[in-house]
Amino acid sequence: MIVCMIIALSFVAKAQTSCDYNSSDITFNIGTPGILPSNSLTTYLLVDHATGIITKISSTQSFTGISQSKQYDIYAYSYVNDNTVTGLTVGGTLTNVSAACGDFSKPLLVNICVPPSNAGVCDYTTTSFTLKTVTSPPAGATTEYILTDLNGVILQKSVTPSFTGLTGTQSYNVYAVSYTGSISNLSIGSNYSTITGACYDLSNAFPVKVCVCQPTCLGVTLTKVK
């Protein structure tokens, strides 16, 4: 079993393929709770679709400060406020949330594309770049690196954190994927959020903006000088 295979990335020098939201702050409509006892509360949860981990909790139908572009499930959780609710914490898993009297809504699946914090800055102006890992890949596991667009579609994959053949001005996300055994959907053209396997882990997204200058052809007149 692989435990805590999160791999952080830094510079060396988000299935759905459209974005429902293009912001780190969102407002949604998941409906209104039915008739509840007077001492009931309703809380809204933003849950990582791939892992089931709670990333945000709100008392209103909105979330702020979302930092990663990926697919999420939004739940409304209504429960009687009798001090029996447990597991309702950021970083916990949805399956651990329980109460003596509580119920979840059906999930609302959303694809959130958070603009890179460095959206106006070019990290690289070349057709290739290399990142480095802050922590070593887990022993005994296979680690691959993937380059995705902001919708999560895998554009390139590599056994090293290097990517080549880039053109134009584009924003990307880079992920490290570590796994043992078989893994599915780790292929170019797939969405990273559809990756599955018996034992795997995915790093946080690392945003990169590449600005490759396009050559401009200028007419030149040559004159023979005697």
Image (spheres, rainbow, N blue to C red):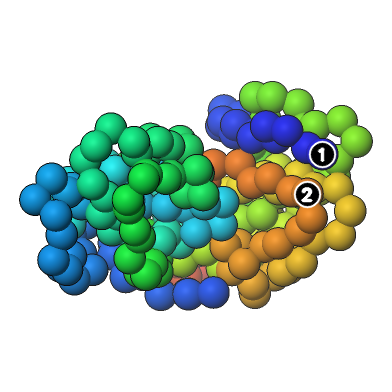
- Residue 5 pos. (x, y %): 70, 35
| Residue that numbered label 2 is attached to | 199
Task: Report helix, strand or loop for mark 1.
Answer: loop
Q: Identify the residue shown where x is 29% and y is 64%.
A: 21
Q: Are marks 1 and 2 in contact (CB under 8 Å)?
A: yes
Q: Nearer the viewer, residue 164 or 90?
A: 90
Q: Residues within 10 Å of mark 2 (few under 14, many from 20)?
A: some
Q: Is residue 171 left or right of residue 22?
A: right
Q: Secondary structure at mark 2?
A: strand
**Which image quarter is the C terminus in?**
bottom right
Numbered mark located on residue 65 in the image: none
Q: Quadrant of residue 7?
A: top right
Question: Along the line of sight, which residue is nearer the eye, 31 or 37?
Answer: 37
What is the quadrant of the N terminus in the image? Answer: top right
Residue, x 80% and y 61% (percent of image)?
183
Residue at 87% in and 30% down: 139
Which label belongs to residue 1? 1
Residue kind at label 1, given as amino acid type: Met
Q: Is residue 208 visible?
A: no
Mark 1 neighbour density, 10 Å: few (under 14) some (14–19) many (20 or more): few
Residue 67 in percent (x, y) is at 37, 43
Residue 78 rendering spot, x and y as whole percentages: 25, 54
Q: Amino acid at mark 2?
A: Cys
- Earlier in the chain: of badge 1 and badge 2, it is 1
Tell me the distance, in whole angstroms, between the alpha carbons under discs 1 and 2: 7 Å
Q: Is residue 90 above or below residue 146?
A: above
Residue at the image point whose x is 68% and y is 45% from the top: 201
Is 222 or 23 nearer to us in this picture? 23
Asked whether the viewer can see residue 82, the reply is yes
Residue 1 relative to residue 74: left or right: right
